[in-house]
Image (tube, rainbow, N blue to C red):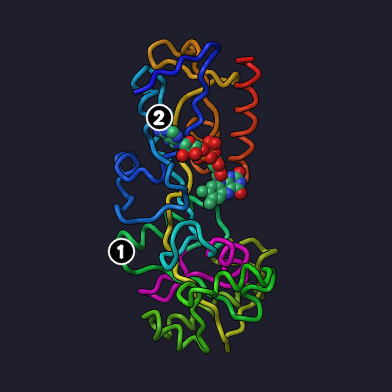
Amino acid sequence: KKTLKAKKGVVLAAGGFCRDKIFRKLQDPRIPDDVDSTNHAGATAGVLLKAFEIGAYPVQVDWIQFGPWASPDEKGFGTAPILTQQGTFKYGIAVDVRTGKRFMNELADRKTRADAEFKILREDPKAYPITFADTKMAFKDLSEEVISKGMASGKLVGECASLDEIASKYGVPADALKESVKKYNEGVKAKKDEFGKQESALSEINEAGPFYVIRLSPKPHHTMGGLKINTKAEVLSSKTNKPIPGLWAAGEITGGTHGASRLGTVAITDCIVFGMIAGEQIA
Ligand SMILES: Cc1cc2nc3c(=O)[nH]c(=O)nc-3n(C[C@H](O)[C@H](O)[C@H](O)COP(=O)(O)OP(=O)(O)OC[C@H]3O[C@@H](n4cnc5c(N)ncnc54)[C@H](O)[C@@H]3O)c2cc1C
């Protein structure tokens, strides 16, 4: 055991806790034990808990964000988030394999989509929803490098010649699947999607195929909650709601900055801005 003393102050910057299986489940019991996360192995709650122990204020700790673009067919963040978000979600649809029907706006915010996928997986943990688009359109905006990375394992992206092949390979009712594609294309023509998909992202799916298909499984991606700080990045006490002397925090270990569903790309801004503020305050 070593004791390190700080002369001016301590900044807690231990990140989020998406890889902490026990703590994340205590906060959100929906999370299955065996579900993977997009985070690195150090994304654990030890430092957060230590801060609570000395009286730091918790805020929105059970608000955990799941990546609705992740796949069970690869580990961690992987390549699926790019292949779906900038590919099959944009130029295709996602369906519930049990019914063959769409169940969400494929480009809605992360929480809306993850909740919709979770609803299916809670009813049947193995009924991973699928997303697909015809091969001409699916990955047209992506680099060769990303596409070949996604294809490399042979497990992540399924290639199917027709809607019938998707139906038999993924156990989807064929007629309902065809009806869903037809209905989607009608919505594209009418510029009105049944799930409110953005008009600018509506393009017809070539019903004749062939198709690229990816299975979906929401993975814990970001923990919005954590330590309550003020605008000076000082950690507040749960007893007094005033700063705990000498204690600052920045980044994903803090809570309250992003609300219930963090927007993509703004976590880094949060980390950098409050990290700089904490440094300036201490210096
Ligand atoms: C795959 C992925 C893609 C992302 N893409 C984006 C993006 O494009 N834009 C964006 O804004 N955000 C993105 N995010 C979110 C963003 O990257 C994170 O919120 C941010 O990096 C968190 O930074 P941090 O410094 O708070 O924590 P981290 O970067 O997680 O650093 C915390 C460090 O503390 C260490 N640590 C933890 N506990 C202990 C302990 N007890 N003792 C010692 N060390 C400990 C950890 O090992 C780690 O090294 C993404 C996240 C992931 C996982």
Q: Foreground: 27 or 260?
A: 27
Q: Secondary structure at mark 2?
A: helix
Q: What is the C-alpha distance between the residues marked 1 and 2?
A: 31 Å
Q: Which mark is residue 206?
A: none
Q: Secondary structure at mark 1?
A: loop
Is residue 90 found inside the magenta-colored segment of the image?
yes
Question: Which residue is the site of mark 1?
Answer: 125
Question: Can residue 15 be seen here?
Answer: no
Q: Which image quadrant is residue 278 in? A: top right
| Segment tinted magenta in the rendering | 80-103
| Amino acid, disc 2 | Leu
Q: How many marks?
A: 2
Circle nearer the N terminus (1, 2): 2
Dot in front, 1 or 2: 2
Residue 145's x, y, as percent? 65, 69
Residue 68 placement, left or right of 118:
right
From this view, report whether residue 83 is shown above or below residue 229.
Answer: below
If the image is split into quadrants, where does the N terminus sit?
Answer: top left
Q: Which mark is residue 48?
A: 2
Residue at 45% across / 75% down in the picture?
A: 155
